[in-house]
Amino acid sequence: MSGPGAHVESVLASYAAHSAESRGRVHVEAEAPRRTAFQRDRERVIHSTAFRRLEYKTQVFVNHEGDLFRTRLTHSLEVAQIARGIARALRVNEDLVEAIALAHDLGHTPFGHAGQDALHECMAPHGGFEHNLQSLRVVDELEERYGAFNGLNLTFEAREGILKHCSLENARKLGELGQRFIARRQPSLEAQIANLADEIAYNNHDVDDGLRSGLLQLAQLDEISLFARHAATVRAAFPRLPERRTIHETVRRMINALIVDLVQESSRRIEAAAPKTIEDVRSAGLLIAFSQPIRQEADALKTFLRENLYRHYQVTRMTNKARRIVRELFTAFWDDVRLLPNDYRERAESDRARAIADYVAGMTDRYAIREHRRLFAVGEV
């Protein structure tokens, strides 16, 4: 591979993922003359149907509840931005880390974790539902863009990063891709970075959305050390700053502090492990991590959000409705596959449950609401 991409990769650490050393794609393709394999992965994700649908899928607040709240799309873009910065600081592959970050939620159901939990319950007799495995299924099978193959035909390294969690039962069915879960090995540094960039993004941006919605109050967050420490600095520096801008400035500083700590601790671990190749990385312990004090602060914030935002009664009311919608859609299609669109009806002939799960998981929030109304409301078609 020659061209601009080769020059960019020439400055990477030896243990980074290099496109020329990729384990390749399931379906062999000719290389592009001016783009690396990982650049092509990123661009295929961005142009996919599933990526566009993320605009109308829930992060915390259901899509129609307001225009200012984050969606799966804006979340994925924020993860990619954070991940690229960390990758650059650690001299690993920015294009790969961005491809993983942009693709990591492609398999998420409508209505966020509530939809996922409901679909998993419906699929329990049929192998269950894992959104990471569904993201892999989207890029391997469900996208229909190319004449020669189903899916996006991403590289092994991108697919490895997308599948950040997997049950052992499912890992055994995935061949080489699932082997690391069985052998308890690590993925690439790029995959590890995307995983923690995801955590940084959703924890801190959920603080912002929670305060914007009025479900969280500043007084509550002043009890959480990670927030309180940076909020105190902001108030001292800008005592007359309006509350909204105080929140933005505080969240910005929290994100920066987490990134700085992650880069410092990860650099220390990489130096101690002294990997020479990506295979050394896979054989080492976890190399991308926060320091212990920051890990504890991040966990405290995560616990706070779970108890005070995700379980807030107003959020719970909506998530209960979401679970009911997903369960009732699944049951309706299971009882009568003729209600499915033609292409899913054809798939249901060989695996009814998985075809229904693919259809429901691919819905946006508002499409799921409309489909439920068409099926159950008198007078709707």
Image (tube, helix red, strand yellow):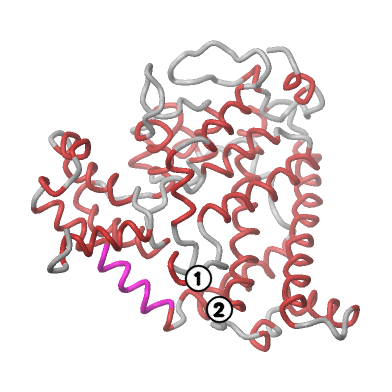
Q: Nearer the viewer, residue 265 or 308?
A: 308
Q: Are marks 1 and 2 in contact (CB under 8 Å)?
A: yes
Q: Is residue 6 magenta?
A: no
* In the rendered image, the vertical position of residue 177 relative to residue 110, given as above or below: above
User: Which residue appears at 75% of the width and 24% of the height?
Assistant: 9
Which quadrant of the view contains residue 239? bottom right
Q: Residue at x 66, y 67 (%)?
A: 298
In the rendered structure, which amino acid carries the disc numbered 1? Gly
Residue indicated by mark 1: 66
Tell me which amino acid carries mark 2. Answer: Ser
- The total of numbered circles placed on residues is 2
Q: Which residues are magenta?
A: 315-325
Where residue 75 sits in the image (x, y, percent)?
57, 55
Q: Can you say whether 210 is above or below 162 in the image?
A: below
Residue 155 position in % (x across, y down): 53, 26
- Neighbourhood count class around disc 1 (C-alpha, 10 Å): few under 14, some 14–19, many 20 upward: few
Q: Secondary structure at mark 2?
A: helix
Q: Is residue 1 left or right of residue 265?
A: left
Residue at image position (51%, 35%) is 47
Residue 64: horizontal and vertical position, in percent? 43, 67
Q: Is residue 239 above or below residue 135?
A: below
